[in-house]
Amino acid sequence: MRNERGVTLVELLAGIALTAIVIGTATLLLSSVIRLFGDESQQYADDSQIQLTLNTMTAQLKEATQVIAFSHGGDKELRYDHYNSSNTLVLKSLYFNEAERKLTLFDFSQDGTASNDTSDFANAAHTPTGAPTKYSNPVDLSRMATSALFEALNSSSNRIPIPSTPYPAASTGQSASNRMLYLTFGFERSIVTATDGTKPSPVTKTMAVKLLADWTAK
């Protein structure tokens, strides 16, 4: 005769408990996968932002012939001339805002009055907050920068801070080796670890680029 005994209360509770364990384990694994994916995406975004900054400034300064640098308290600024895609010489400003941890690229002194460009270029008093009309078309390169250092080579091929006067001066006839620039940036990024998820991992990147010695429109 077939046993038609039903499920006892103990068996039912055991089944419910086992199901809860399985669902809980699956949920925990799924949340871990989602968190890991998010962490890895953030690390990729951080590294991409850093690389974009370096690539952009390398491309910009390869088409420059003269630079000048200023310190505005903790903020740092690099101004340079730059031949754009229309073969027109324009002025640019790379501005590091220490408080906001931002690296921003501006068009500089694009007010339509070319006669002001030379004096504006060398005017240390200009800043994006103090002379906002001199800075236009901002492009945020990074919002996780922690430091910026702008250096050049002196006559002994030693690295020195880029001066607050136009460099190289038109009359110096700097050799090609002494037209090298070194831009060093600190960034606060996140990395993924096997045990701790994400954690801060500061990184310093230095780029080297040579200024144009001459330029001829083609």
Image: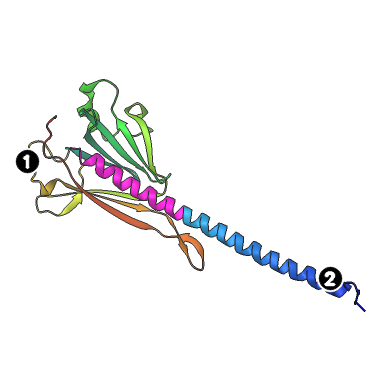
175 to 38, vertically: above or below: above
Contact between labelled residues 2 and 1, with CB atoms less than 8 Å apart? no
Is residue 30 among what the camera can see?
Answer: yes
Q: Quadrant of the image for the C terminus?
A: top left
Describe the element under mark 2 as helix, strand or loop: helix
**Which residue type carries mark 2?**
Leu
Which is nearer the N-term, disc 1 or disc 2? 2
Across and down, in percent, residue 198 comes to: 49, 60
**Which residue type carries mark 1?**
Gly
Residue at left 65%, top 62%? 27
Residue at left 52%, top 57%? 37
Q: Residues within 10 Å of mark 2 (few under 14, many from 20)?
A: few
Residue 133 located within the stretch drawn in magenta: no
Highlighted magenta segment, given as a residue range:
42-64
Describe the element under mark 1 as helix, strand or loop: loop
Across and down, in percent, residue 19 comes to: 74, 67
Quarter of the rendering containing residue 66: top left
Q: For this view, does 110 lie left or right of residue 193?
A: left
Q: Quadrant of the image for the N terminus?
A: bottom right
Across and down, in percent, residue 153 comes to: 15, 50
Q: Which residue is mark 2?
A: 12
> How far apart, in angstroms, are the residues tagged by discs 1 and 2?
91 Å
Closer to the camera, 50 or 69?
A: 50
**Chief secondary structure of the magenta portion:** helix
Across and down, in percent, residue 181 comes to: 20, 47
- Residue 173 is marked as 1
Closer to the camera, 207 or 167?
A: 207
Quarter of the rendering containing residue 75: top left
116 to 199, vertically: above or below: above
